[in-house]
Amino acid sequence: MKDQLHYNDYRSGVVVNGLERSGQRALMYSMGLEEEDLHKPLIAVVNSYSEIVPGHIHLRELAEYVKQGIAEAGGLAREFDTIALCDGICQGHLGMRYSLPSRDVIADSIELMIEGHRFDGMVMLPGCDKIVPGMLMAAARLDIPAIVVPGGPMLPGKDHEGKTMVMSDLREYVGKVQTGKLDFDTYKKLEFAALPGYGTCGMFGTANSMSCIAEILGMSLPGCGMAAAVSAEKRRIAKRSGRRVVEMVQEGLTARKILTREALLNAVTATMAMGASTNSVLHLMAIAHEAGVELSLRDFDRISRQVPYLCNVKPSGKYAVTEVGEAGGVPAVLRAVSRWLEPNHMTVTGHTLVEEAAKAPLVENDVIYPVSAPKNPEGGLAVLYGNLAPDGAVVKKSGVKPSMYHFTGTAHVFDLMEDACDAISNGEIKDGEVIVIRYEGPKGGPGMREMFMCTALLVGRGMDESCALITDGRFSGSTRGPCIGHISPEAAAGGPIALVENGDRISIDIENRSLTLHVSEEELQRRRAAWKPVERPATPALARYAALVTSADRGAILKQPDKA
């Protein structure tokens, strides 16, 4: 009888093996399962389907392809959902405070479901900004066989002049309407033309940055990151991923065997070459933390000085993400920067990232520039330090015009993003000013909102060569212009940004990686003695987040009880 009731030697065996598990087996049978199903590895299909997020509205269909692959390989697929917030819809109002905290809720919810039901492996279906890193954090934390299948980018639209158009273009048109450079009727038509269908927004924002990073980390099959949401190729990859995860269970290839320090360094390398979102810094550091891997801002800074920026992709370039995918996508980028890749980084394919990159053709054209003649000789992101950011700050250098690599201006200080946006819209920001937006950090927000509405207004008004913006908040991957975020320590923690006053002189030097407040140490000490932090009311979820969250230079990870 004992042998008759022993069904498998996988993790999930603890759920179904033995006489005392009759209740669990009955629950499985009540859902229509056969006894033979209990012999199969139990594979979770972790979906983030949502009707409010265009990057997720098609994920039920994609999950069916994953489940077909799992069944073909002899696994038992069972699907469950996580939450999914749309940064685009949350953008520019108080709802953005909930976006970054959702990353940890997603990771926690997956941990609870996977550990509670003892799954053997999982295929995760994310799409937008915080869902991809949240799922990668869960994979690193749980260390079971796992594959990520991001939902894929949407196709680009066309503007009134027939040019490729994505969400970041549309946001910037607001400033053009305000200044009379674009008529209102044309703008209304562009709202319908900008986003022609489902998928993640077509520029290289955080959603597509992190989807590509999942592939670079070795957690997705090659070509997955930039395969369009509507494409047949995305569905083939989904099915192959379902088959492959069952093989990984048999092989014992778990997430932490992939998510090594070498993997994280390779992700930083490709991030620099692609000109990815500044949010990728936060998320890679959080993934590294969950994997037990050391990664710091110093790693980003070192690699950014070595690896050139190659991808001519919006918002910093000309092409939509799907067009870069058609030119070769992530595999082509990896082939181009292979000399800088760590060689022993294993991927979900069972081969190293370097081995997979060698299979891709070398692409050198207007979409993916050659290493010998890059779009910029340094990487897409830069880390700045100085008396205004002792623990670091991040800028998307690929989105800054060279004329603004060096800029000194007069501080115009705001303690709330909406106030800064209103000042820009009302013409109150003057040439030569540095907009300072503070108390928007992880703890101070709470939630570390994106300042994209402000940056889009500046660029749309043509002020990205006469003004700069600095903040302890963060930016959308759609952001371009001289916009420096993640200033650490943040204002709520007593960082120097809390002491800035209107009229102070601030110098930005992107080439030399410095951010300087031209105020004497004696004066700063006087201001600190009189400083009182701005405190905002918070809902229970945000209050808990503010109590646990660390600073941006640590990835805005959550502290564990009794730990620093």
Image: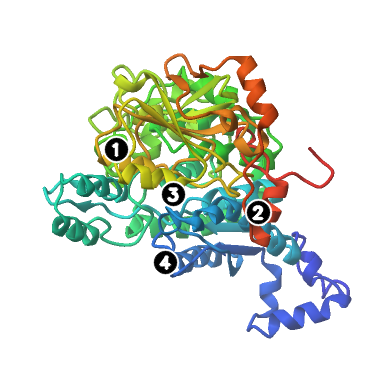
Mark nearer the N terminus (3 vs 1)? 3
Which of pointers 3 and 1 indicates the residue nearer the eye? Answer: 3
Residue that mark 1 sits on: 459
- Dot 4: what SS? loop
Q: What residue type is labelled 4?
A: Ile
Would you identify the image quadrant in which residue 321 lies?
top left
Asked if residue 258 shows in the view, the reply is no
Mark nearer the N terminus (1 vs 2)? 2
Mark nearer the N terminus (3 vs 2)? 2
Left or right position of 293 against 173: right
Residue that mark 2 sits on: 249
- Dot 3: what SS? helix
**Cβ atoms under marks 3 and 2 closer than 8 Å:** no
- Disc 3 to disc 1, C-alpha distance: 17 Å
- Residue 244: image x %, image y %? 54, 53
Residue at image position (23%, 30%) is: 366
Residue at image position (51%, 30%) is: 268
Residue that mark 3 sits on: 418
- Residue 367: image x %, image y %? 26, 34
Q: Which amino acid does label 2 sit on?
A: Val
**Cβ atoms under marks 2 and 4 closer than 8 Å:** no
Which of pointers 1 and 2 indicates the residue nearer the eye? Answer: 1
Residue at image position (39%, 32%) is: 275
- Disc 1 to disc 4, C-alpha distance: 31 Å
> Residue 57, labelled with which disc?
4
Nearer to us in this view, 374 or 158: 158
